[in-house]
Image (cartoon, helix red, strand yellow):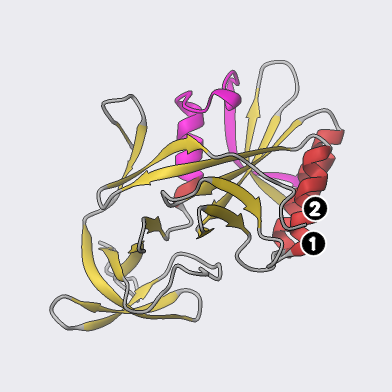
Amino acid sequence: MAIDGNGLLKYRLPELTRAILIKRYKRFLADVKLETGRIITVHCPNSGSMKGCAVPGSLVWISKSLNAKRKYAYTWELIQLPHTLVGINTLLPNRLVKTAIENHQIKALSGYDMIRSEVKTSAHTRLDLVLEKKSGAACYVEIKNCTLVEDGTAMFPDAVTTRGQKHLDELEFLVSQGHRGVLFFLVQRMDAKVFRPAAMIDEVYARKLKNVSEKGVEIMVFDTRIDTRSIQLAHAVPVDLDSGL
C-alpha cells in the first residue's frame, strides 16, 4: 500500500502485461493472446459469474508470479470495458477495506481499537472483519466484491448466492445481539452512480438485503479509482434497496 498526494491509500499493482482475452472458462482459467501473438492460459482470481466483465476480444492486463511452482505463471488483474477499467482480483477488496479502516480512511468505521480478520461467528460462518473497542459493542463487517454495473447501476450479486444469503442472516443475528453489522460492497470499477441489489438475478438475496437493512444492518458501498498501476478506495455510492422488488 502507498499514500497518494491527497492522503488516500493506493494498492500498488504488480507490473502488468497487456493481452487480449480469448475466453474465460472453468471459473478460474482464461486464455489470452499476448502482443507477441502467443496464446497462454492464465489464472482468473474470481469465482463469480463475472457477468459483463469477461467479453472475448477485450483488452486485459495480467501479472506474472515469481513462484516457479505455480501451474499458471500469470494472473488476470484488469479488463478494459468501454467506459472503465474493472478490477478482476477478488482478493483486493478485503485488503483495501481493512487497510483503509486501519488508516482511518472510512469515517463511519473509525474509533475502534482493534481489527481482526476471518472471524468465526457461528459453527459454520465466518465474517471478514470484526472491529473492537476496549469497551462497548463490536462491529462485524462482511466485504463483497462488486463488478456488475449496467447503465450506471452497480448490482450484487452477479449469480445466485446462498452463501451471501447466509452472511445476511448472520449479520442480522449479530445486530439483534447488540453489535453493529455492516455489509460493505466494494465496486471495482469507476462508472457506478447508484447501487441496487440484483433482484433479476437473485430475488431472494435482494429481498433479504432490504429486510436486514430495515433491522439495523448497515449497507455501505464505495467505488474505486483504478489505473494500470494501482487501485484505491474512492467515493461512497448511493444505495437504493427498493428498485426492482
The image quarter in which residue 234 lies: top left
Residue on which disc 2 sits: 208
In the rendered image, the vertical position of residue 224 relative to residue 100, given as above or below: below
The image quarter in which residue 68 lies: bottom left
Q: Residue at x 42, y 69 (%)?
A: 44
Instruction: Residue 41: give x, y in percent of width and height.
Output: 33, 80
Amino acid residing under circle 2:
Lys
Whether residue 122 is visible, yes or no, is no
Q: Is residue 229 magenta?
A: no
In the rendered image, the vertical position of residue 116 relative to residue 186, given as above or below: above
Highlighted magenta segment, given as a residue range: 94-122
Residue on which disc 1 sits: 204
Whether residue 96 is visible, yes or no, is yes
User: Which residue is nearer to you in this view: 159 or 73?
Assistant: 159
User: Which residue is nearer to you in this view: 180 or 210?
Assistant: 210
Badge 1 density bin: few <14, some 14–19, many ≥20, Cα 10 Å: some
User: Which residue is nearer to you in this view: 75 or 51?
Assistant: 51
Q: How many marks?
A: 2
Q: Residue at x 43, y 38 (%)?
A: 233
Q: Is residue 82 left or right of residue 199?
A: left
